Image (tube, coloured by chain):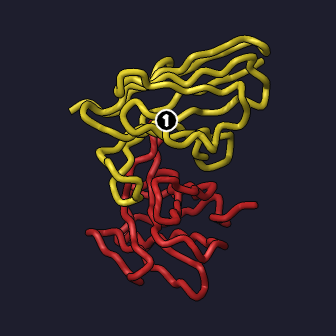
């Protein structure tokens, strides 16, 4: 039972345009959400997070939106840069250290 | 400063062999986590240490998996009698957190890729 789903395995975007990565979850008890970015042969690195009491969190070029009624979150990257090419994992938590990860979306930003 | 390091980076084992995977967390990090990432999947939680105490081992898939952190720093994940389904990347993460909450960033190591033939 996949509680956190990233239905798009891959996404290609032109440099300078917006990248939108999506994530859906099934458990309404999740109250904290994170995005991690992973380059090949490296471990995932934290990118941005959002608490369920908010619907938006912004950090530079990265914005995460949370729609609790739809159990959906998205990561927007504007403008996209070639260095953003990586695998992006969405993760959720029920208020603990235990993160439930999605399967990842591979983003390719084309120069 | 130095991040989380793991060794070996790659390990090939024959089915039935025992393996030991090492994790060196960031100095001073109290919390340490192990995750298993199968091919095409996201990381899955295995176990959690706070200092030397293993507070949660609910994610360990079988009693063939054993983790320890005897002095509250370096941790070892041991897999006995390896099976082909154990093939995966094993990730270690550490965090400054002393609480059990989600808000302190988990810093991941590069992982050990285990292949069981």
Expressed as whole percent of the image width and height from the top left, the position of residue B23 reads 43, 25
- Tell me the chain of label 1: B
Viewer-proximal residue among A93 and A36: A93
Q: Residue at x 50, y 31 (%)?
A: B111
Please give the letter of the chain rendered in yellow: B
Count the marks. 1
Residue A17 visible in this rendered orientation of the protein: no
Does residue A57 lie above or below A2 as drawn? below
Viewer-proximal residue among B82 and B7: B82
Viewer-proximal residue among A48 and A94: A94
Residue furthest to the bottom in view is: A69
What secondary structure is marked by label 1? strand
Quarter of the image for residue A71 reads bottom right
Q: Residue at x 42, y 34 (%)?
A: B109
Image colour assigned to chain A: red
Residue A70 visible in this rendered orientation of the protein: yes
Expressed as whole percent of the image width and height from the top left, the position of residue B95 reads 34, 44
């Amino acid at each position: 039972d996949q509680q956190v789903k990233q239905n798009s395995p891959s996404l290609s975007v032109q440099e300078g345009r917006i990248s939108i990565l999506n994530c859906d979850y099934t458990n309404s008890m999740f109250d904290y959400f994170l995005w991690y970015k992973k380059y090949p042969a490296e471990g995932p690195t934290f990118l941005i997070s959002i608490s369920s009491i908010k619907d938006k969190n912004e950090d530079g070029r990265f914005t995460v939106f949370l729609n609790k009624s739809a159990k959906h979150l998205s990561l927007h990257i504007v403008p996209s840069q070639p260095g953003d090419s990586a695998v992006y994992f969405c993760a959720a938590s029920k208020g603990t250290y235990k993160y439930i990860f999605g399967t990842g979306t591979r983003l390719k930003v084309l120069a | 400063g130095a991040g989380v390091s793991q060794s070996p980076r790659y390990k090939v084992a024959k089915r039935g062999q025992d393996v030991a995977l090492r994790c060196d967390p960031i100095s001073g990090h109290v919390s340490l986590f192990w995750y298993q990432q199968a091919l095409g999947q996201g990381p899955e939680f295995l176990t959690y240490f706070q200092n030397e105490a293993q507070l949660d081992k609910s994610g360990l898939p079988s009693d063939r998996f054993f983790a320890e952190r005897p002095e509250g720093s370096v941790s070892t994940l041991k897999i006995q009698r390896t099976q082909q389904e154990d093939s995966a990347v094993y990730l270690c993460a550490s965090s400054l957190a002393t609480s059990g909450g989600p808000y302190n960033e988990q810093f991941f190591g590069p992982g050990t890729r285990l292949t069981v033939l």
